[in-house]
Image (cartoon, coloured by chain):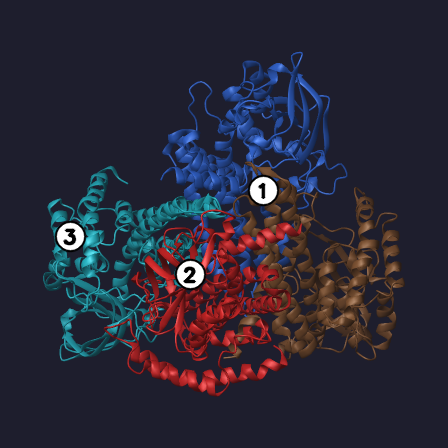
Chain colours: A blue, B brown, C red, D cyan
Amino acid sequence: MSEGARPLFEAVKRHIRENVDPIMEEYVRLGEGREDRWSFAPGQLELLEGAKEKAKAAGLWNFFLPNAETGEGLSNLDYAYIAAELGKSPLASESLNCSAPDTGNMEVLERVGTPEQKKQWLEPLLAGEIRSAYAMTEPDVASSDAKNVRCQAVLENGEWVINGEKYYISGAGDPRCKVMITMVRTSEDGPSSQQQSQILVPIDTPGVEILGPMHVFGADHAPRGHMHIRFNNVRVPEENILLGVGRGFEISQVRLGPGRIHHCMRTIGKAEIALDLMVKRGNSREAFGRSLIMLGKNLELVSRARIEIEAMRLMVLKAAKAMDVLGNREARVWVSMVKAMVPEKTCQIIDQAIQIHGATGVSKWTPLAELYADVRHLRFADGPDEVHHMVVGRNELALH
Amino acid sequence: MSEGARPLFEAVKRHIRENVDPIMEEYVRLGEGREDRWSFAPGQLELLEGAKEKAKAAGLWNFFLPNAETGEGLSNLDYAYIAAELGKSPLASESLNCSAPDTGNMEVLERVGTPEQKKQWLEPLLAGEIRSAYAMTEPDVASSDAKNVRCQAVLENGEWVINGEKYYISGAGDPRCKVMITMVRTSEDGPSSQQQSQILVPIDTPGVEILGPMHVFGADHAPRGHMHIRFNNVRVPEENILLGVGRGFEISQVRLGPGRIHHCMRTIGKAEIALDLMVKRGNSREAFGRSLIMLGKNLELVSRARIEIEAMRLMVLKAAKAMDVLGNREARVWVSMVKAMVPEKTCQIIDQAIQIHGATGVSKWTPLAELYADVRHLRFADGPDEVHHMVVGRNELALH
Amino acid sequence: MSEGARPLFEAVKRHIRENVDPIMEEYVRLGEGREDRWSFAPGQLELLEGAKEKAKAAGLWNFFLPNAETGEGLSNLDYAYIAAELGKSPLASESLNCSAPDTGNMEVLERVGTPEQKKQWLEPLLAGEIRSAYAMTEPDVASSDAKNVRCQAVLENGEWVINGEKYYISGAGDPRCKVMITMVRTSEDGPSSQQQSQILVPIDTPGVEILGPMHVFGADHAPRGHMHIRFNNVRVPEENILLGVGRGFEISQVRLGPGRIHHCMRTIGKAEIALDLMVKRGNSREAFGRSLIMLGKNLELVSRARIEIEAMRLMVLKAAKAMDVLGNREARVWVSMVKAMVPEKTCQIIDQAIQIHGATGVSKWTPLAELYADVRHLRFADGPDEVHHMVVGRNELALH
Amino acid sequence: MSEGARPLFEAVKRHIRENVDPIMEEYVRLGEGREDRWSFAPGQLELLEGAKEKAKAAGLWNFFLPNAETGEGLSNLDYAYIAAELGKSPLASESLNCSAPDTGNMEVLERVGTPEQKKQWLEPLLAGEIRSAYAMTEPDVASSDAKNVRCQAVLENGEWVINGEKYYISGAGDPRCKVMITMVRTSEDGPSSQQQSQILVPIDTPGVEILGPMHVFGADHAPRGHMHIRFNNVRVPEENILLGVGRGFEISQVRLGPGRIHHCMRTIGKAEIALDLMVKRGNSREAFGRSLIMLGKNLELVSRARIEIEAMRLMVLKAAKAMDVLGNREARVWVSMVKAMVPEKTCQIIDQAIQIHGATGVSKWTPLAELYADVRHLRFADGPDEVHHMVVGRNELALH
């Protein structure tokens, strides 16, 4: 971590400790047992806004974003240390306006948005007034190959007419979510990497039909959700396109590098929580006359988890540094390395923490089941493990 | 499979195909989106009762249970083949009156129940009129060591007074569930394996407080559920004890052998479903110009899954045969072998099937997420993997 | 095991115990420290011949081979039980005239040999007077694809003229080895599975140049060895071809099914030895105040090894039974399943046994290092794991 | 790497390329097929001495050792980068006078030796005139628990009289090896960590009986070897003790920290070689119409190997840095982390490289079999994996 970033790092930890951790219990309690699960409960947003105001007041707002004019800002490396802390608390990111997919969307708008696009969407996002979604994955094709995108946009009379289906659009159920960056196919011809574009679609545009929430191991994560949406002749102005026709993949380069790294950084925070719970539980329960942690292979599992966590942390830091030094493009092999490594190993650590808890490990009494579902989901989100291994493997061949 | 059992095996498969599979879709649809999740929807039970009647009419009712007088009945080996089929359908077992934990409870009542206990509880269970639960696991102790049971029963004026807490009592949320076999501590002295007893507790007894449903990866499996129950001075007649004071572990020997085997048998049916879905999905989707199944390691994963399934099947059959030939006690090492082997390997197979489906794999569009949760849960239910490995390992040492 | 085979099984075990085990120590001692490592030491063969004579006298000779006229003989299933015993002793197979690759060679000659070929080679092999080799693998191509065979045989004036290179020809260093069944390419045209033939090549034919022994993890297994041989215009009579031109793969079907199964059966005997040594060592050494076997994950490793061994055993028996019932062709998927499963898992078990022994585990003081090398070698001999997984995976796809 | 160390790093790489790689082939060839395997062949040492002279001339001699007076020297971190290069060549370390166990022995003598001890042993070691051994492991006890040492030294008339057995004393077969640092028990009473001492034993002392070479997977690594030695009333002067009576473990702290790190660093160089060979072989061979590397899981294995190698490298660098900054004692958990991680993962990578080579992978045609044996051996040398996991696991518990 650079010396310059340390005060921010400490301030973020203090903010989480003082402003976020204390509201968690009430926030969760308010959300329980509601009939209308797809809205926030009275009081929930007020709690969250309170934490956001405190973050703003403390100058901790939007630190993820480089200065628009100078390009200066937090390095990926410094951000990595902070993100690992954010990963330990479900509300921390949002309280600092740096939740996914908003950060990626803001970065994209900042870099490639027109002045009008920035005014309409980036400003309220930066202010934390609205939220956004990213509509990429489709139910009918293998999204592991990004070229398979089938949702179609056709230009008619100065409007894009969009038809198709997207699913697992995270956050699109949130009543505050106002816009989706949508990956579409705008051409059937030409090089296969120039047939896609990204278009801003306000979520209340006629024809946007929310078919329902998708589940992750039985959880729908209401009210934010992972929505299944059909686009029925959805019409948006021609100027809603980002960067230009056929440049959809180019934009993905902008967003996915840091986005994947941020996910991995937060995931390491989750692995830390799992290990912490594993040790605490193993120390506090007894069977056959010894504490659980001293039975059989348990202590070795603790050791292996610690070793893997440190190895993952160093790899993420190295990848972050590579992005800082080499740029997103050159660092993409490092990004793929950590994306293929971190979620898989973290799933194993969480799974072992579950096992030592017994049935409590899959209950709502610990965060483990939800952590598992989150991290398991990450093994195919933003490119499945297999595709990242393909990137790394091919790069290795190219070096010979 | 013995020649004698083949007609039954075929009849069961036909019953599932003709009477159970056709009602599944409507049964699930009826249960969706209900406000009162802890009851059955109008029409659901009627569907199920229809299938039960057809099973009775076809002579397929209660085949799991040996003849009370002659002791004759389906061998464990023959049952194993049938159970693998049952595991493929969520309603098949209940339509044939052989769901867990009812089968175990009926076996126990049949073997050790008094005439009065049989009349009151076994008869309606055999008739499929009521359902039952087994209250074993406690939230405050490591249940991997069965001697840790803390829920207490004290004899006062001809009544057992029960105080304590149990959780993950599967099926106790079902409105038809009328009785729980409850493991309690009846003594603090004497040999540690004779301090426990099992007592029949009608679920509507005053003092039985249902604290709420437990979750398995976010799912509560309403309306059957896995309930968390507190016993507040619950009073039942002295004669509700099973077999005798201090004989709780002895009863466990009766129930757990076949019970664990039945679980493992059904689990193999689940592994088959996962492999089937993995192949179908992998064949039907394309990426990078090839079907998914032909990419990378996928075909090898299919092969490894097939090999493991066949090895698990043979091991379960061998364990079932050992129980038939050697009896539950001598066969217990075989039972532990399959209990330690089958859920772990099946989890891996389901996990790989999930990965090849991408996000759809954790949605409700396939049964995979639910299968995963079920089988993952089995890795600590009825003794965690670690305890079964301890049994097998110690037996190996004893042979030297 | 069939009732009829049990007396043979018992007789073989007795033979090993009484006639083979007692000569092992002296046999090994005689072979040590010799300058001429590529011959047997004085007395070694005499010891072995003594055991062979006793086997003949006891009617235990050549039981592997079905009756030439009736086709009757030991089933693969019954053989499986016996082979697991043979795998536990390095000399047992040879003392009963059923070592690899002689058994496969004798089976092939028995099934497809001409009367002259049988008289010249099968008879002395059946008598145990000579030994033989199988020249298949080539150093310059990926032998995982059998169609890659490059060693060439051209018919000239009634003679096959053979040119090419083979390596890892097991047993070709044995002074008693007189003939090699050699896989050659006899055509560059036509269907790719009909370009290969198998030809009998006496090892003393001019042009057969032994380039040297190949090593397996540093061991050359002198004096039997795994030889590297160059064929320089080696001329053998036209009638030395087996079955016919272009029928090389057809013959492989005959040999490889049982051959692979026999290897796997013996391998299970080796896994048993490793587990036995692991338990004995773990029980006899102490560290940190407990026996090694009770420390950390060791007891669980014992359990997992036992479970895997039983699963492998059942799979091999099932595959043997499939060959008996369905024939080699239909049973080939079962054969591939066990070939892909057994050596890989056995390597892991031996590796764990090594670890618990510490440095002694890789020394010559235990058989573990040699067992490891043998079984590791098997993971690419007779088709590497990957090819067998391909067979199993493709078969699974074909079922859908 | 620090800027200051880069010239050294480059000079070492150049030295290996120019002075070591070119002599390897002849060095190996000279050593082949000798009758007297326990001496160097004529010419071998001359080749080696030539490379040593060039290293001295280039100022690359003894850079491993901190300045005796100022304590300054190469940091562990900088050494780590160099050691990874050394690991790629079997002769590189010796050509620079930094082979194991000489480096550890020289470090110990430098730090705790008396002026006389330094004059007699350190000076010729630093000059590269003699070599040395470290006699630690015993055949009759579990050496994983260092307190188990049984070899006894009793003080009689100003002489230590040593009796006991040691094995796997690497390098003790080398005719140039003149002295062994020997771990002995000097007391049966007192705290169990103060009963051991380390004593300098000239290898030609009467009573030092070399029983023979130990093997590692069949290889004896003549002429250096891993010797099995019996101490029969071996008498050395009282002043041959290092540091003081009962301070054997204290000395181990000095040596083992850096020693283990150096091993791990070199091991990463070996993993790089294995990956390099895996890729080259996989690219150059074809089967089923594609290059091997593009078949099945092979490309994913390449990716996983690359990811693991980078993770291991970062962990070793971190541990080296921890030693520089925190000292050996505080850094010991980091040392245990890499010692438990690196050899195990590297064995897997080498094993996969072997598999893609087929039989050639276990032959002498590639270095893979020897690399495997070396690295496999490391999994129990200098503390088995299990003990290092115990250290890491216990430290984790202590943090809670």
Alpha-carbon span between mark 3 and mark 1: 63 Å
Tag 3 and tag 1 share a subunit: no
Indicate which label's residue lies in the foreground, 3 or 2.
Answer: 2
Which of A5 and C98 lies nearest the eye of the viewer? C98
Farthest front residue in view: C157
* Amino acid type, mark 1: Leu
- The residue that label 3 is drawn on is D68
Q: Residues within 10 Å of mark 3 (few under 14, many from 20)?
A: few
Please state which of residues B329 and B51 is positioned toward the viewer in this rendering: B51
Do tags 3 and 2 sit on the same chain? no
Name the residue beneath numbered marker 2: C238
Q: Position of residue B183 (x, y in %)?
A: 71, 69
Mark 1 residue element:
helix
SS under mark 2: helix
To which residue does mark 1 refer? Answer: B292
Q: Quadrant of residue D5?
A: top left
Answer few, some or many: residues within 10 Å of disc 1's Cα (few below 14, many 20 plus, some between 14 and 19).
Answer: many
> In the picture shown, does residue C180 fall above or below A247?
below
Q: Amino acid at mark 2?
A: Glu
The quarter of the image holding the N terminus of chain D is: top left
- The three-letter amino acid code for the residue at tag 3 is Ala
| Residue located at (57% from left, 58% from top) | A356
- In the picture shown, does residue D25 fall above or below A82? below
